[in-house]
Image (spheres, rainbow, N blue to C red):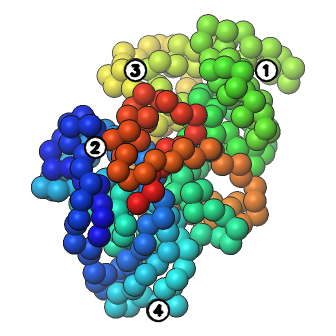
Amino acid sequence: MKAAFYEIPGAAQDVLRVGDVPPESPGAGMVQVRVAVSGVNPSDVKTRTGSGARANPWPLTIPHQDGAGVILQVGAGVDAGRVGQRVWLYECQLGRPNGTAAEMVTVPEGLAVPLPDGVPLEVGASLGVPALTAWYCNEQIQAQAGRCVLVHGGVGAVGFYAAQMARLRGAEVLASVSNADQAGIAQAAGIETAPRGADLNGAARQWLAQRQREGFDAFIDLDFAGNLSSNLALAENGAHIATYASDTDLQPALPVRDLMRRNLRLSFLLVYTMPPVQKQKAIAQLNQWLADGSLHHPQVHTYALEDIAMAHQAVETRRHVGKVAVLP
């Protein structure tokens, strides 16, 4: 089968190659999927560079955790009726060398989730890491009616889903965005916005005042270190910060007394170590929202498999608003 792969960590243009790799036959409890779309996440990029949080010890790695396609074959113990089923895929390269940047991928059947009718395969490939992370953040902060939530990066792959999910759970939501174009994308999905940067605190306070509130009950954050001072300034007593990244500084100094004064709670989240029970709950809820048509989805920017290095560079440089994917 045709696949993209790398054998050593390094820059995308230096280490990513495309060639023939033997497909893996499905063993017991596994399914082989013909991949239609392979999603690219920041964690895929970090794993390729050798800076990721997970070990990657294999001599040859086919990257990417997420994807979508159609089941071709099933192994022993798997319902033969799943052959031909449209599925979305997640964590395909977690603990394994072969991800979705290939014509086929073979995974435990639980990682191939039935994709509801009418949901495009490119949307299915955009779920995985972003949507599960977004759900987990909302679960941690207990987003619900009566709570005000600030989502940083409201049109990012995670933030776009997180803001919508908080609203679906009944919370009032404000999301930060970088420019007018991003504000338009968010507002089309029913998400109110405020500008990122120096004007955020003032705009957020105006939004709170309209609701006769002094602070936010919760924050969903893509950069813990970079946004901490703003979160402290805008936090209600007892507020909860759920963060899934801190690329500005992975070892920030914590203003402990300020955190204590506000009785703040911190949740640091990584989808790859999310408890399995929570993950299955998230998948069930996500598929229900997909079936109901409750979610707007990020725009998907696609690259040919042969251009996978360009796709990785697009993620690294944040070239696009939305999701990056490759087409095997």
Q: Which element type, helix, strand or loop, lies under badge 1?
A: helix
Question: Residue 47 bears which disc, if any?
Answer: 2
Instruction: Mark 1: give few (<14), some (14-19) or many (20+) Cα within 10 Å.
Output: some
Residue that appears at 57% across and 46% down:
300
Mark positioned earlier in the residue sequence (3 or 4): 4
Kindly report the distance in space between the C-alpha atoms of the residues bearing marks 2 and 1: 40 Å
Numbered label attached to residue 80: 4
Q: Do the residues labelled 4 and 2 touch (CB within 8 Å)?
A: no
**Mark 1 against mark 4, which lies toward the viewer?**
4
Q: In x, y percent, where is residue 13?
A: 26, 37
Marks 3 and 2, Cα distance to the nearest angstrom? 18 Å
Q: Mark 3 points at which residue?
A: 248
Q: Which amino acid does label 2 sit on?
A: Thr
* Dot 4 alpha-carbon crowd within 10 angstroms: few under 14, some 14 to 19, many 20 or more: few
Whichever of labels 1 and 3 marks the residue nearer the N terminus, that label is 1
Do the residues under discs 3 and 2 have CB atoms within 8 angstroms?
no
Q: What element carries label 3?
A: loop
Mark 4: which amino acid? Ala
Q: Which residue is rendered at x = 32% and y = 22% of the image?
A: 251
Badge 1 is on which residue? 208
Is residue 122 visible to the viewer in this orientation of the structure? yes
**Dot 1 amino acid type:** Leu
How far is mark 1 from mark 4, CA to CA?
54 Å
Mark yes or no: residue 270 visible. Answer: no
Which residue is most to the left? 59
Disc nearer the start of the sequence (2/1): 2
Q: Distance between the residues labelled 3 and 4?
A: 48 Å
Mark 3 residue type: Thr
Quadrant (top left, top right, bottom left, bottom right) of the C terminus? bottom left
